[in-house]
Image: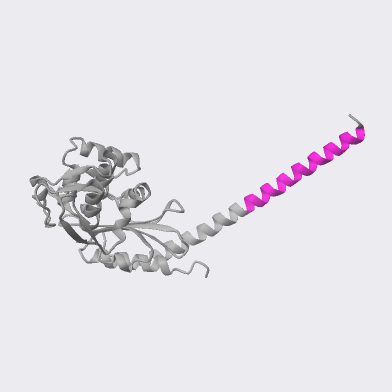
Amino acid sequence: MNPVNKNYLLFFILIIVALEAILFSIGNHKLNTISENEEKRIIKMQNALSQVSVEAKAFSVYDIDFNREIYGKDQNEMLPLASLSKTMTVLNALADYELDHIITISPNAISQFSDYRFFINEKWKVKDLAKFTLIGSSNDGAFALAENDNNFLEKINVKARKIGMENSLFLNSTGLDIDVYGGKAGAYASAHDANIMATFAFKARPEIFSVTTLPEITLRSESGYIHKIKNTDIIAEKIPNLLFSKTGFTKLAGGNLTIIFKNKDEHRIVITVLGSSIEGRFSDMENLVNVLYNLDYES
């Protein structure tokens, strides 16, 4: 090769290397800036949340888009889940059956602690019974979805571990207390794990779980009966940009509530409160959401 051409080639290679180094440096600077900004936002959120007074025994706030827990109080303590566990029951049914598969309401299902006026042998599509069960927190619906699965409990406990719920235990399909006086609940999990469960459900089957944001729905069973079901989350309409909600209450659990919403920065935030009162779960959640939604991240 001509010496002159060789020098041009070397000069060209040096320019390319220098440009790559500059671009790499700029990229790293941008990443560092983004990381610093995210950390500042998280610290601001943590400081604001530390000032919120809640009645709940435990709560957890998780930013889905930052993929990290922001703040919590006893968030890893296993507590009774009550009807929050129906999220896992519905997830299992949706995995086991086609959406149009027909479930028949048995006498055993109707005998569960509930009053949704199902009829014996009433037939439902899985997708409609799942929506009914979620928005109305229906014990008879949850029981019916799990009744014919002999391996139901094994499946949902294995599933819980697979998705990262390390502090959880499911003992029935409804979350109802098994023995109030003996202190045995139907399901247990930490607030952190309840957030994992809700996030997984929302991402996996949004077409079903999004129904939990509505104030009420009307569904028709395959037997022709019309049912109007109100949302057990009485503050669903007050939560801005609500994406998911699920309530729970038993004597052992107290009041529980999980929600997912978008803040003003379009971040998806999931919050669970456990061990509050039947009314306190709603005021606790409103206080936490209001702080996070109205927080000025730029000041």
Location of the N terminus by quadrant is: top right
Q: Position of residue 32 (x, y in %)?
A: 59, 53
Looking at the image, the residue that sits furthest to the top is 1
* Residue 36 picture quarter: bottom right
The foreground one among 176 and 126 is 126
Residue 79 covered by magenta stretch: no
Helix, strand or loop: magenta stretch: helix
Residue located 47% across and 59% down the image = 42
Residue 127 in sight: yes
Q: Position of residue 282 (x, y in %)?
A: 27, 65
Would residue 10 be found to the left or right of residue 137 on screen?
A: right
Residue located 76% across and 42% down the image = 16
Q: Position of residue 190 (x, y in %)?
A: 29, 50
Residue 16 covered by magenta stretch: yes
Would residue 119 be found to the left or right of residue 287 on screen?
A: left
Q: How is the image coloured?
A: one colour
Which contiguous range is marked in magenta? 3-29
Looking at the image, the residue that sits furthest to the front is 224
Number of callouts: 0
The foreground one among 243 and 132 is 132
Q: Is residue 56 above or below residue 129?
A: below
